[in-house]
Amino acid sequence: MVLTADILGMLAFTLVAFWGVASWALVRTMRQESRKIELLEGQDRIDTYSPTALAELREWIQNNPDDPLVDDARRRHNECVETLEGTDRRFYDWSDEEVERLERI
């Protein structure tokens, strides 16, 4: 089998693209984890849900009141609300107004 310049070029591009994306993902993840550790060391707690995720969890709880997992979901929702109310620095992009509007279920 003969490897032409086109094939070798495509192979090189694929390897560079793969390692480039993998390296970027690794660096981004490590920075996020470092920020989480910093928050945990400074305040002992960290918000567990983004605004979108917490809204989706609340909606799921309201739409599935008879689900066997609903009690666990309520507990997790309420824990996140309590954490948000009790911390000054947050991992996810929560505004003070959003936190003030949150209610326990």
Image: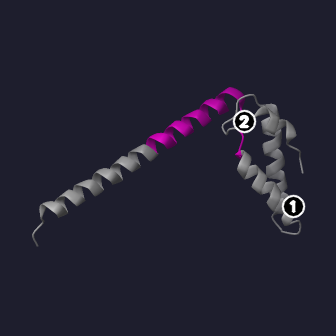
Label 2 crowd bin: few (<14), some (14–19), many (20+), radius 10 Å: some
Part of the protein shown in magenta = 26-50
Q: Residue at x 73, y 45 (%)?
A: 51
Q: How is the image coloured?
A: one colour
- Helix, strand or loop for disc 1: helix
Write down the residue under mark 2. 45
Q: Quadrant of residue 40?
A: top right
Residue 25 in the image: x percent, y percent? 45, 46
Q: Quadrant of residue 14?
A: bottom left
Write down the residue under mark 1. 62
Image quadrant containing the N terminus: bottom left
Chain-order first, disc 2 or disc 1: 2
Label 1 crowd bin: few (<14), some (14–19), many (20+), radius 10 Å: few
Residue 20 as seen in the image, left or right of residue 61:
left
Of badges 2 and 1, the one in the foreground is 1
Residue 22 in the image: x percent, y percent? 40, 50
Residue 97 in the image: x percent, y percent? 81, 35
Amino acid type for the residue under numbered disc 2? Arg
